Amino acid sequence: MASDLAKKMTAVDKLRRLTSKNPDKEPELGIALVDLADGFKAAGRAPEAVARIREAKQIYQARVREWHHEEILVAACLSREATWLAEAGDATAERLFAEEASIYLELARSAQYDKVIDRLRLLQDATQGNLSAKRYRSAEGAARACIELAQRLVRQAPSEAETYLVNIHNSLVLSLGGQGRFSEAQYEAIRSVEIAKQAAARGQLTDRKAMAMAFMLMKSANQQGGSTG
């Protein structure tokens, strides 16, 4: 662990020197800083993790201002920073979570007609990445933006949209459950099953795994809801 962290620190130091001579290396430095921040967090060095993720965020924010498409990378930094601050009881985490969620929504709402699927996949990746890292509040924000975008897709490709919606609602259930918000998770689980049933009735839903997971999550959410009622 210590040697791995040392390698990440060395990589960042090297990229700092390269970036001072060649600004085009900034994206690589940003990636290395995020990796180092994760390493610091895993090592229990939270203040250093927050400092490095803020540095990466500043790099990506500067690139956004220069019309580079780095918004999703800014959101990835905000996700870590907000989650880590929340764990430390820092109230500023709320503002950062809101800022992150607004990025996801703007990405959803700004997608052009022919880019809806690509943008949906991008936001789904953000949702799953946050879920995998147990950043449940961030996963919720990304999932809600996905739902809004998938609802636009209904007019273009109903069958594909319904499969997306079932999967996204399933992710939203997991993100809400991870936050202990079981009554809300229960509602979303029921909604996911409703969409799956409606699609299946028309023979449109082809993703059986999504449907099976929807029923499993609804059963689990119902049990959790009953135990907390």
Image (cartoon, rainbow, N blue to C red):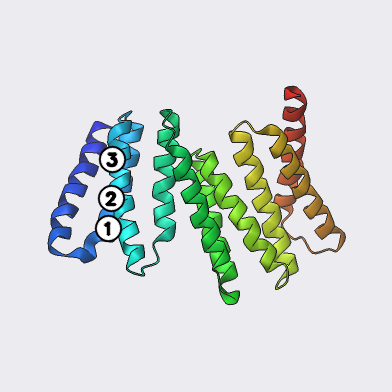
Towards the viewer: 92 or 129: 92
Q: Which residue is found at the position 51% from the left and 38% from the top?
A: 134
Label 1 sits on a secondary structure element that is helix
Q: Amino acid at mark 3?
A: Ala
Gap between marks 3 and 1 measured at Cα:
17 Å
Q: Position of residue 120 (x, y in %)?
A: 58, 62
Position of residue 115 in the picture relative to residue 69 (left or right): right
| 154 vs 128: above or below | below
Q: In which image quadrant can residue 66 be found?
A: bottom left
User: Which numbered circle lies on residue 51?
Assistant: 3
**Residue drawn 20% across the image and 38% down it:** 6
Q: Dividing the image into 4 quarters, which one contains the C terminus?
A: top right
Residue 198 picture location, percent across and down: 84, 57
Tell me, yes or no, whether the two marked residues, 1 and 2, touch with CB atoms within 8 Å: yes
Left or right: 34 with respect to 191? left
Q: Mark 3 against mark 2, which lies toward the viewer?
A: 3
Q: Secondary structure at mark 3?
A: helix
Q: Which mark is residue 4?
A: none
What x and y, as percent, mark residue 132?
Answer: 51, 42
